Image (tube, rainbow, N blue to C red):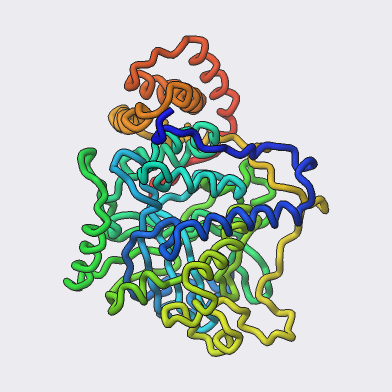
């Protein structure tokens, strides 16, 4: 086996939690994985290292005070200073999916709120224990210094929850022309809390007002060109704007939902939970020192303010744990005192951090009422329990016309062709479970003839999931 095609170790993420030891032991082992990963590549970000950014304002345009007491939403017309950063997950040769990072920092008088997301509403996985293995497949391999498609597909073929994001990334929407022409998403489920501590679950969406524009199949993402495009637009005073929207879900609705509302690989139905506008983000000022203001910004998914909080999403909880440690390693223990990371809230600055609680330390009023657990048993998250990984990708695929489906198949086959036959067959099996047409189109491009029985099995599996799929819609935004 050549170094380029070496197989990475894939962890078993479906093992019985009863055999894995205590919850404290699992948390310590998970933290050690993230600590090891964060320290492997020195000072640059381990992921989303190459990017661009600018400053601007968020203006509240709609009243959501009945759901949240957060300062940026407190009054229509209120303006909040923001910093928005765009990035790529890792090096790409143009043939592989290129997930982009989209993060916004809100500098509020309650502290800094970081919305750390991406240009897709879902992620590759839901189990945080598989995160570092996934991340290693996105980065250059040690033996060659090159990204290895075999390692990527070997991971994805063993994690069918990645099918939803893969279908998005290999579709036309996965190839944005520049940063200005793509949407952003919070990915995870978050919380909005009113002044009484009443919680409403929410999903954040940033919809570009420039319209979406995509690269041609022959085009490749150029990070420098995308950075220049953003800078030139602001210089011309063609300030790029995004509409901040939310989907809202009550606790009762969450309990009645047929899918897990805290699963980062699935979306919420836009029919059942329509988008509601909150305000507009406008970028209108370029950084004066790119390193100090863009590269040294330390985004943290757990940097919340009163009125905004987290959720039981296990991947969000793991990122909340890991990002602070990663930023401390990358920028040092005093990174919160760097100008771009300093809080505009005097109380937080006194307490020594951008995301410290904006209340006296003797108070119990932390602004987050917590959430009620369904049971008293605390155990390891089970990634494969009660999940249908094929229904939502099936809905998305069936929304596309024949020409678009063929473009997806062509792009996937161009990448999958560089992998071993066993990986190809394993991945084709998952595509067939989504839709027989999906699998056969990719297989045909690879020159592989699938057995009829395999197609029949896939169709039977599709019928079993039809009831769940019928209630879901994939957002066209």
The x and y percentages for residue 159 are 54, 36
User: Which residue does the image show at 42% across and 48% down from the upper left?
Assistant: 139
Q: Which quarter of the figure has residue 371?
A: bottom right
- Of 207 and 297, nearer the camera is 297
Q: Quadrant of the N terminus?
A: top left
Q: Disc count in the image?
A: 0
Relative to 53, does residue 221 appear above or below in the rendering? above
Q: Is residue 435 visible?
A: no
Specify whether 434 is left or right of 19. left
Tell me residue 39's x, y (percent): 51, 60
Does residue 9 lie above or below 178 as drawn? Answer: above
Please report the residue visible at 38 percent of the width from the left and 59 percent of the height from the top: 49
Viewer-side residue, 400 vs 175: 175
Q: Where residue 279 sits in the image (x, y, percent)? A: 41, 69
Residue at the limit of the structure toward the left, as seen here: 236
On screen, residue 366 above or below 6: below
Residue 409 figure quarter: top left
Residue at 55 percent of width and 48 percent of height: 131
In this image, 272 relative to 46: left or right? right
Furthest residue toward right: 376
The spot of residue 334 in percent (x, y) is 52, 79
* Front residue (pair 468, 296): 296
Of residues 303 and 28, the one nearer the viewer is 28
What residue appears at the point 47 percent right and 10 percent down from the top-left corner? 452
Horizontally, is 352 left or right of 246 in the view? right
């Amino acid at each position: 086996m050549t170094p380029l095609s070496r197989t990475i170790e894939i962890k078993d993420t479906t093992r019985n939690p009863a055999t894995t030891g205590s919850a404290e032991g699992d948390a310590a082992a998970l933290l050690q994985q993230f600590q090891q990963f964060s320290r492997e590549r020195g000072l640059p970000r381990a992921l989303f290292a190459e990017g661009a950014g600018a400053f601007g304002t968020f203006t509240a345009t709609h009243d959501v005070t009945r759901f949240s007491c957060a300062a940026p939403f407190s009054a229509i017309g209120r303006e909040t200073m923001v910093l928005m950063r765009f990035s790529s997950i890792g090096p790409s040769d143009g043939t592989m999916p290129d997930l982009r990072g989209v993060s916004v920092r809100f500098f509020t008088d309650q502290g800094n709120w970081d919305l750390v997301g991406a240009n897709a509403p879902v992620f590759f996985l839901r189990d945080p224990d598989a995160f570092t293995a996934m991340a290693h497949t996105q980065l250059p391999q040690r033996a060659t210094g090159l990204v290895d498609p075999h390692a990527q597909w070997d991971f994805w073929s063993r994690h069918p929850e990645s099918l939803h994001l893969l279908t998005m990334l290999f579709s036309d929407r996965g190839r944005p022309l520049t940063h200005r022409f793509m949407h952003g998403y919070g990915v995870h489920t978050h919380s909005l809390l009113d002044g009484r501590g009443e919680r409403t679950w929410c999903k954040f969406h940033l919809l570009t007002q420039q319209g979406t524009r995509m690269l041609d199949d022959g085009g490749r993402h150029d990070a420098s060109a995308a950075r220049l495009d953003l800078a030139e637009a602001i210089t011309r005073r063609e300030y790029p704007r995004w509409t901040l929207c939310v989907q809202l879900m009550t606790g009762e609705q969450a309990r009645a939902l047929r899918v897990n509302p805290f699963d980062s690989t699935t979306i919420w139905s836009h029919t059942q939970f329509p988008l509601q506008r909150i305000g507009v983000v406008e970028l209108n000022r370029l950084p004066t020192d790119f390193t100090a203001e863009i590269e040294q910004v330390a985004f943290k998914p757990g940097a919340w303010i009163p009125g905004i909080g987290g959720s039981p999403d296990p991947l969000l909880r793991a990122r909340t744990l890991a990002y602070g440690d990663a930023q401390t390693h990358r920028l040092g223990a005093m990174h919160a005192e760097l100008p771009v990371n300093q809080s505009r809230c005097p109380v937080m600055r006194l307490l020594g951090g951008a995301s410290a609680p904006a209340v006296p330390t003797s108070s119990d009023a932390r602004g987050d009422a917590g959430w009620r657990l369904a049971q008293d048993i605390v155990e390891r998250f089970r990634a494969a329990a009660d999940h249908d990984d094929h229904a939502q990708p099936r809905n998305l695929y069936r929304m596309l016309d024949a020409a678009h489906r063929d473009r997806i198949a062509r792009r996937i086959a161009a990448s999958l062709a560089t992998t071993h036959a066993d990986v190809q067959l394993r991945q084709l099996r998952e595509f067939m479970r989504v839709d027989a047409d999906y699998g056969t189109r990719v297989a045909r491009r690879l020159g592989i003839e699938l057995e009829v029985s395999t197609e029949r099995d896939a169709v039977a599996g599709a019928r079993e999931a039809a009831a769940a799929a019928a209630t879901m819609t994939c957002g066209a935004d």
